[in-house]
Image (cartoon, helix red, strand yellow):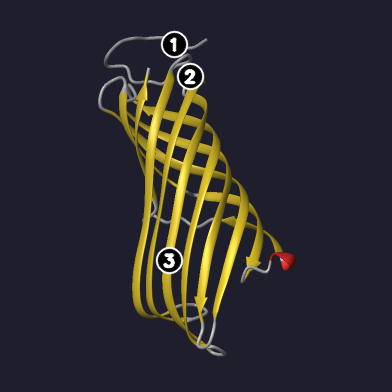
Amino acid sequence: MGQETDEPNDFRVTKGRYFGSLTFSLDQREAENEDQLLRYVIDQDRLNYRIRGSAGYAIRDNMTLGVGFGYGRQREDVTFEDEDEGQITTKRVEEGVAIVPTLRTFVPLGKGQFQIIVLTELNLTYGESLQRNFLANDVDKIQTDFFEAGLGVSPGVLLFFDRNFAFEVTVGLAGLTTRFEEQIVNNDRDNRTRIVESGIDLQINLLRLDLGIAYYF
């Protein structure tokens, strides 16, 4: 049975508590004259961000079940050298909306003002992208509709300012994703391309953090 308490110095997430949170992540990169793995980049400018609102309920002490709704946008302008085509400039924009069922596990230290959290998330995203490739003598236009399903684990920390307000930081640790795409090249709708990609990501990127504020009640 959950330990219900209203003591102002007890910050534990006990059974029956609710929460709401708002998180934001940002990934920005600029590069010039960089020899990357498969290409030589002359100039690169990338900006990705994501905003998510979440709410949930503590089904037991130190464990909540909830759902989040998010919006993300990715933009990249890059110019690189290609062995066959010479210099190519690519401009790409992608937008997507997501619904994210989430299980949160909390490990309180002491009375719980500082806690370790682990998020297990099922991320379901639908979106679209537009990419233009500026070749030496031509321009390719690629329109893409996509659906992506991902299961991931994100550890982090939670710091309570008082019993209700908290600040949280999480970082993606591991994830399994499957992405379904339908592409139309140069408005040729009679020859759509369908692509299915699956992958496992075990890379930790400390420059891509989810920062958020939360209210527990």
Disc 1 and disc 2: Cα gap in Å?
Answer: 7 Å
The one nearer the camera, 147 or 91, is 91
* Location of residue 79 by image quarter: bottom left
Q: Position of residue 160 (x, y in %)?
A: 30, 27
Cα gap from disc 2 to disc 3, whole angstroms: 43 Å
Q: Can residue 13 be seen here?
A: yes
Element under disc 3: strand
Task: Give the foreground label among 3 and 1.
Answer: 3
Q: Earlier in the sequence, mark 1 or mark 2?
A: 1
Residue annotated with mark 3? 76
Quadrant, the C terminus = top left
Q: Nearer the viewer, residue 180 or 175?
A: 180
Q: Position of residue 151 (x, y in %)?
A: 60, 44
Q: Tags 1 and 2 in contact by the CB under 8 Å rule?
A: yes
Question: Residue 11 placed where, x, y %?
Answer: 33, 20
Q: Amino acid at mark 1?
A: Gln
Q: Amino acid at mark 2?
A: Asp
Label 2, secondary structure: give it: loop
